[in-house]
Amino acid sequence: MSEKKEHWEKVFATKQETEVSWYEQKPETSINFFIQNNIPKEAKIIDIGGGDSYLIDNLLALGYTNLFLLDISANAIERIKSRLGVKAEKVTFIVSDVLDFQTEVVFDVWHDRASFHFLTSENEIITYKKIVSKSIVSNGFLFLGTFSENGPLKCSGLEITQYSEAKFETIFGGDFDKINCFEEMHQTPFETKQNFIFCNYKKK
């Protein structure tokens, strides 16, 4: 087991959902992305590093029917399956490091809130970008959320990469057209605040 996988298996085995900084009962920013961009209910949607986040619950409630969730942690996947109960049958779950992800499915939406920023080497970032670019349909959406340059330097005890709009453009601008970027404060369950940047792209 890699150190990365071991770390995340331990997190999801030992911490309750409200004991992690990314907990949101209703992830409004992500939900608003789907509503504002009129994402069709039958769109193929993948949530990267979604863990046991409540995005999938909310997308199911909105009537989305073609959902995939990828996470490196099997414990995280088991937690969300348990919470969803019979609704879990409506979701395709994938236990994998995103950098090892291989799929024949091409997605209409690639959603990643706070997973991408854990990639800290140039090689990891390039690999991620290549996987994203070949996994999204033409005119498909890429929605990314990371810590901004005004955000924390670590998450869950791990180093992260901070991002700005210009930094996102350097990586993704060649294959994607930017729709918008914005910063937002996330309040953690511990009453602290983290500054995020979210960018919405469309595949060329």
Image: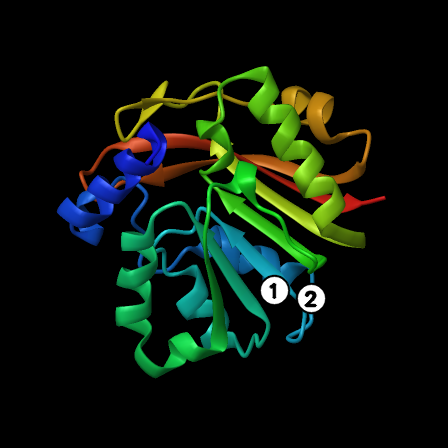
Residue 10 relative to residue 77: left or right: left
At horizontal 85% and vertical 44% (from top left) the residue drawn is 204
Point out residue 21 in the picture as x, y percentages from the top left corner. Answer: 27, 39
| Marks 1,2: beta carbons within 8 A | yes
Quadrant of the frame with the N terminus: top left
Q: Is residue 39 above or below residue 47?
A: below
Mark yes or no: residue 184 visible.
yes
The quarter of the displayed image where residue 77 is located: bottom left
The amino acid sitting under disc 1 is Ile
Which residue extends farthest bottom?
86
Q: Nearer the viewer, residue 109 or 151?
A: 109
* Pointer 1 residue: 35
Residue 152 location in percent, x, y? 36, 22
Q: What is the secondary structure assignment of the residue under circle 2?
A: loop
| Rendered image coloring scheme | rainbow
Residue at image position (22%, 41%) is: 11
| In the image: residue 147, left or right of residue 139 | left
